[in-house]
Image (tube, grey):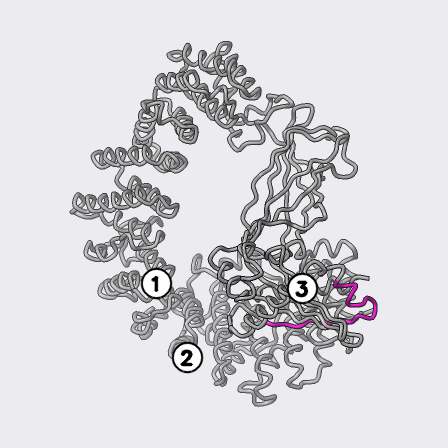
Amino acid sequence: MAGSNSEWSQKVAAFYASPSHFLASTTTENFVYDLLRVLADEKISENVKIQILGIIQEFPGLLFTNSLVAEQAAESIFSIYSQLPLVPKSVNLKCHLLLSVTTIVIATDHLTSNAKILNNLMSQLLDTVCDTNDRKYGGHFRPLRALACDCLREFETCHPGLLSRKLELLHSLQQKEVSPLHQAYTLLYIQVLKNAVRTLSRSRNVSDGAIRELLTRNEEIKWKVMEKPQDLLAIATTTNLTPLPSTIETKELKSSVTLLLEESFLLTPVSQAAVFHELIQVVLMVRSLSPAIFRSQLLRLFGTMDISLMHSMLHMKASFTDSLFSAEDENFLLKRLVCMAQHPLLSNPVKLFYMDCLLHFPENRPINSNLEENLPVLFTPKMAACLFPTLFNDSSTMMSRLNLVSLMCLDSAEEERGLAEIFDYLVSLYKLVDANGSRGHTVTFFQAVYIFVSCFHASEMYMSELTQYMVKLYQRHCTLAPHMINLIDSIQHLLEDSKWPVSLGEALRKLIVELPPKQLSPHKLIWHLKVLARVAKEPTILQKTTVQFLLNVVQASDLCRQGEWRMGNSVLSVCKSILHHQNVEPIFSDLADLLQHVHAQFQDIDIQDHAHFYYALLTCLSHEKLAGIVAPGTGNCIRAKARSLSSLMSESAGHSISVLPIKHPVLKLIPVPEEGSSNRGPAGDMTVKDFEEDSLQKYLNQFQNVGFASTIVMKFHLTFAEKVDPEYHKIYTVHLCFDLRSTHYEPLSDLHVPCLFLSRTPHVFSLAFKPHLPFPVMLHTRAVFTKEDGSTCCSQLEPVDIGFARLFLALPVPTNWPLEMKARLFNQFWESLLQTGSSQSVLSRFCFTTVQRPLSELVNLHFQKYVVSQQSDPESYKAFLFLPPRVHLLLSLEQAQDMAKVDIVTDNWQLLPFINSYLIDITSEK
């Protein structure tokens, strides 16, 4: 059976939510047949049919898996299209039907041999486009003609040359069309023309009159197998074009191209760019057509503000160089790009586009042929001076301009002067980071350093001065350690022979090991150890003072006694880098003392075990074997003990302990069914007397000046899932990572559980949710834990739905307020929200039947704790709810015969969809 409109709307929504999951409950063929039956059912509304056709258009490859289903679907949809009366109200549905048939034919390979369907479809498309200027059916059917043009273009794209036998017809239609659809006809004709010329250029024997014959053809369409994807890609580019013989007659073609260019100004900029792209390929293939045919368009293009047309002009220049652009044109175009790259009215992305055009400018006579960023020969230092970066530029503009002026400085005769100015700018960025230290400024500064080093690494004086600045910056902001490490890695990857990354690492190491003990707080020490671990990977940097520094730290401080795992792991990471990359003979004694001290004194068994393991490797193996064992990727053979914490921390990558993913959930979270709690709001200090004077104003003042507590605390039980394998009945060091996958909430902190046994009671814990907007959310949880045999596993828990009702809180007012006072506050708040005219406040209404459940029962079940007023004749209730961080929800429920109405007022209109869904859910319960 076809079903009702609402049923199919729900099915369509379920399909879009997860097509594979939806089709798992039925066969693809049955689902397609159901769709076709619904499309033929006159009782189904047009809106639902369009939704169903949307599925066919979007998922043809998933639905039509064989030729029989595709053929039946195409015939059935085409039959429905033919039977629909040609009246204005059916235009929308006819468009979707025609598009669906075209999609089935093009997107699947099952119908390429079915001549009947193909010919019928093509005849219908051509008949539709032949109604030029709406002479036959009128302007109401213009969308159908526009769609037919698009479908024909899609056919021509996937079957290049398919419509080449209809060039005379298409040219005639393009010339006759004077409505806004002239653009669609032009794009169709120019694409068919280009593909026809390209097909002709691939032919072996081409007569002198071949083009004239091509332009005057009006024959039956011959279908052929679709081109291979790589052939389609080649057709879309100007590479690998085969030119036609120069003796071929091109008078008619030249006339057609000239006319297209003269009319191009009537099109939108994007369509003009498409026309230019196609015509460029035509001129490249036909040698007797001079590139000067575009000359008449250059004056208009030189002054364009549209980036698509600017890109088309640069495409012309790259294709025809000095055959079309003189040296004066090239110089003018460069100045134009420089002007546009700093135009104050253009957005930053557009200006960055022009900057990129300068760096990849297609010169008439380029000095080198590589595709890397190069400045053109005519680009002068005066032009570059206009684009020198400032501290007021955004980050992307800064980097783009700095890159450009650095390249200019390398090629300039005044390199020393330009280099000094660039370095001064770098110092200005340094001072900004040193004073402010925001993330954006920091990232920009390190990107600028990367560009500077990549261009001027040969200048020893400036590189030495830069090293001093970098060390000074790290000395004041040791939290920049990850940026320093990333900079060293990136420069070494870019410049393998550069000595600067090593010198920077050596300077940082020297700074760290000479720090006095008072400056080695745990927070700073953890960053210093990261830097030392990276510097230890450089074989040319001796590590004796590093080992002595670490030995002094672990012996003189309470680091070992505190037993903090992260700190111990960081110390061992330095030791591991030394064992892997350094010659340990000069530091054997000190390194052995360090490892032995950590093994004996550190108050963490996992760190003790690893220290003992490294000590054994140091004392028993040669350097070659030792380096091979501790190398990354070779540690998987080492079994960790059951109480190992290594796999839980991000720093554990140095130990290479594997984490085994588990397909099925081992654990599950069970929300405790209780109302979330929050701290007392600002109104908690108000008295009855205060309320009598001006309750709403005082409440609002405290609401705005103090704010409400924005935390909702919810309790959960952590327990085992059903049918868990016995090997997971006892797990240790459980690490829970929570992810709300929503920007409307603050991130949740991870949770650590020492152990969890199936035979014991579930672990109870609380989570504090801090919403920016009180929207429903799904709580996703990942658990990493250790089994009894010592292996570390990872399991994804079933998501927990934090429903809208879990966010409801009673109004934060003093406990001594009677209902009468709350009702007065309700009335004042209601009137205030409706009278203020705020863009956030909104009034809405929801109605439902009360035949199965009376209104009183619904209120008692869901709103009893929020009711501030109720009446019996007529039966009505007023409920005042609060949602953190500072949203009010006022509900006025009233009985009217067998129906009930709910008037809703809130100071945040974005909640209305969730309020509506919640009311639908609770009123639909049986």
The numbered mark, 1 or 2, whose residue comes first in the sequence reads 2
Q: Are marks 2 and 3 in contact (CB under 8 Å)?
A: no
Front disc: 2 or 3: 3
Task: Find disc 2 in the rendering and name its residue.
Answer: 266
* Badge number at residue 868: 3
What is the number of the mark on residue 314?
1
Residue 378 visible in the current orientation: no
Q: Residue 677, image x and y in percent? A: 63, 49
The amino acid pointed to by label 2 is Leu
Asked which secondary structure carries label 1, the reply is helix
Q: Amino acid at mark 3?
A: Val
As drawn, the label of residue 639 is none
Judge left or right: residue 853 versus residue 415. Answer: right
| Stretch in magenta | 843-859
Identify the mark nearer the N-term, 3 or 1: 1
Left or right position of 307 against 636: left
| Spatial separation of the CA atoms under disc 1 and disc 2 | 21 Å
Q: Residues within 10 Å of mark 1 (few under 14, many from 20)?
A: some
Query: Can you give x and y, in whole percent of width and height, for residue 614 in the image?
Result: 51, 16
User: Along the polypeptide, which appears first: circle 2 or circle 3?
Assistant: 2
- Mark 2 surroundings within 10 Å by alpha-carbon count, few (fewer than 14), some (14 through 19), many (20 or more): few
Amino acid type at mark 1: Leu
User: Along the horizontal axis of the image, is 552 left or right of 449?
Assistant: right
Between 98 and 874, the one lying in front of the other is 874
